[in-house]
Amino acid sequence: MSDYDITLGAALGFEPPSDKDTSLTRGVTKAVELVAEALDQMPLLRNLKLTSDVVEQIGSFLTTPVSGLALGAWNKRGEIRKYADPEQFPPGSK
């Protein structure tokens, strides 16, 4: 087991995994800047002034440790396991 936890941004290739720096790196920063520029082109979001909130959430998302996502998914497995039974939930049913 490692003391270092890779971020989602590193897992998606926006930044190199590094055991020394877990801060928002250039790759993630550039991705967030591109999203901010794109959102500025959307009049509805610009008028509602949601751009900074969306960008902040994306930055937060990209710096989320992958282990936290995996642990959350593991903890939810019991809730979704019942849907694997095709007799109780046949394919195509809602």
Image (tube, rainbow, N blue to C red):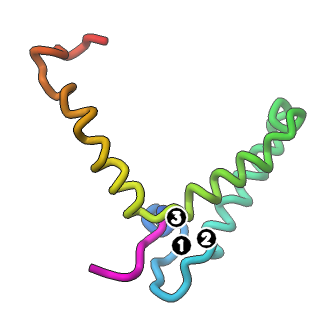
Q: Amino acid at mark 1?
A: Glu
Which residues, given as a range, are shown in magenta?
1-7
Q: Earlier in the sequence, mark 2 or mark 3?
A: 3
Q: Position of residue 36 (x, y in %)?
A: 76, 52
Residue reaching furthest top?
93
Our reading of the magenta stretch's main secondary structure is: loop
Q: Disc 1, disc 3: CB below 8 Å?
A: yes
Label 2 and label 3: CA atoms lie apart by: 8 Å
x 90%, y 34%: residue: 47
Q: Amino acid at mark 2?
A: Gly
Residue 6 as seen in the image, left or right of residue 31: left
Q: Does dot 3 land on a helix, a strand or a loop?
A: helix
Q: Disc 1, disc 2: CB below 8 Å?
A: yes
x 68%, y 66%: residue: 30
Q: Position of residue 82 (x, y in %)?
A: 19, 27
Q: From the viewer's perspective, is residue 25 above or below residue 45?
A: below
Residue reaching furthest right?
47
In the picture of the structure, the residue carrying the numbered disc 3 is 9
Q: Amino acid at mark 3?
A: Gly
Q: Choose top left, top right, bottom left or bottom right for residue 2.
A: bottom left
Q: Choose between 33 and 85: the one closer to the eye.
A: 85
In the picture of the structure, the residue carrying the numbered disc 1 is 15
Label 1 and label 3: CA atoms lie apart by: 6 Å
Q: Which mark is residue 27?
A: 2
Q: Does dot 2 land on a helix, a strand or a loop?
A: helix
Quarter of the image containing the C terminus?
top left
x 61%, y 58%: residue: 60
Q: Does dot 1 land on a helix, a strand or a loop?
A: loop
Residue 80 as seen in the image, left or right of residue 49: left
Q: Disc 2, disc 3: CB below 8 Å?
A: yes
